[in-house]
Amino acid sequence: MSNSLTALDATFLELEQMDEGATMHIGGLMVFDPVPHGDVPTLDAVCENIASRLTLLPRYSQRLSSERTGGLTWPRWEDDPRFDLRNHVHRAALPAPGGDAELSEWAADYFSHRLDRTRPLWELVLVEGLEHGRWALVTKTHHALVDGVGSVDVVHLLLDAEPPALPAAAEQRDSGHAPDSPWQAFLRPPEAVSEIARTGSRAASAGVNAARHPREALRKGRSVADLLVHDEIVAAPSTSINVPIGATRRYRVVRVTLDEVKAIRGELGGSVNDVLLAACAAGLRELLISRGEEPPVRGVRAMVPMNVRESSEGYALGNRVSSLFVELPVAEADPVARLREVVERTSRLKASDAALGAATTLDLAAFAPPFLHAPIARSLYATRLFNLTITNVPGPREPLYAFGAPLRELQPIVPLAAGHAVGIAIFSYDGGVVIGISADRDSTPDLDVLVDGVEQGFAELARLASAIRT
């Protein structure tokens, strides 16, 4: 594993350097049931459990050789001689009653603060005081260190696939190293990858072949040209979700079951991802209309990151992503027509070389020297290219545990780049789907309108699908 940042890794550092409002960390809130025969694990137990497994993640004890990018070379990851796990693992408690509102407000504040670049770029917080005796582990990791799918691999590593026979801390003291527990079965990326993610994987393979075969190189060039024409000459529409932002956030979640989403897909068509995007389009439509804006006829353009990791890259950190740009039909009032439009547009993208073009553009940007790369990074995340990010990361299908307590859900967080006041992260786990919606606090006081709109979008599609079945 190379210790140098890639150009894409460095991009996320540069985006923060160029705008005080940008926060380029990803994360999630893992909510657990009470620990058997107890309340919540102690902070000491959490630290001991992480320490025993951290040897499999050496970059989590490494810092950047330079706090800023630029110059003639990229920063490198180097061992932190002052590394202390207690600087990265903390404890917090929610005010009563410890429900969704309190957890979301705490999360909004926590994710408003950047990570300290003089230390390894991650943190974990043990959060107590959730209702019904529940507790949470909350992760914050800089996007320069890991991408969304890579973060899922890390979750696999830190949790267990079944309740341990002994408390995790006791097992680790006996063995002196990470236990040979069932979590090792997860030493591979999850199989439940969306169609768009698979398209990205094909694009990555095609990129390697194109370098070897002239005809493939020509196809690759055409795909870049098509991408630039579509996403530069035909700019994303101007909307109120693309304004200067500050560093403070709002955060809300929407929950549905995977069975509900599949039932809609089965009756109305499309993929699971299409249904999720259609519901997001419904919410964005409601937000724009409530603000007195005419929803853009061409749609609001979403950047949808794609996993381009090879199956052999389990636990490989850094970023292995490309992107597709999907026009969400927010001007369409009819929910079925809206879904069909999403299906048509994503199908067209998947059948085209759009994924190859995006991957190739990132490859070409990597040739720029560090001191010239920052303007390119800005252009890759400009509001001219897209209005918001919507990520969809498939998580484990089976339940996971920590200290014998089952993980009930994971609430995901997406970064917000300059000029992007709203971002949506979707995470599926053990039959449930959680949509985490992040927003700039000052420019989006009406976030609940978007949240309610997404919920209503699902409800409309579910009612129509149910009516067809009966």
Image (cartoon, rainbow, N blue to C red):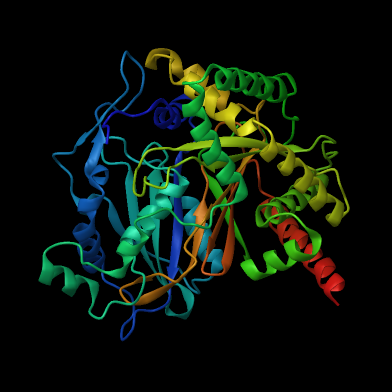
x 55%, y 23%: residue: 361
x 62%, y 66%: residue: 258
* Quadrant of the frame with the C terminus: bottom right
Vertical arrangement, residue 286 with respect to residue 364, above or below: below
x 36%, y 18%: residue: 70
* Quadrant of the frame with the N terminus: top left
Q: Quadrant of residue 296?
A: top right
Measured as percent of width and height from the top left, residue 453 is found at 75, 56
Asked if residue 173 shows in the view, the reply is: yes
Measured as percent of width and height from the top left, residue 210 is found at 51, 23
Find the residue positioned furthest to the bottom.
Answer: 37
Between residue 177 and residue 414, name the one nearer to us.
177
Vertical arrangement, residue 399 with respect to residue 7, above or below: below
In this rendering, position of residue 163 left or right of residue 240: left
Between residue 133 and residue 225, name the one nearer to us.
225
Q: How many marks?
A: 0
Q: Quadrant of residue 232?
A: top right
In this rendering, position of residue 304 left or right of residue 164: right
Asked if residue 21 shows in the view, the reply is: no
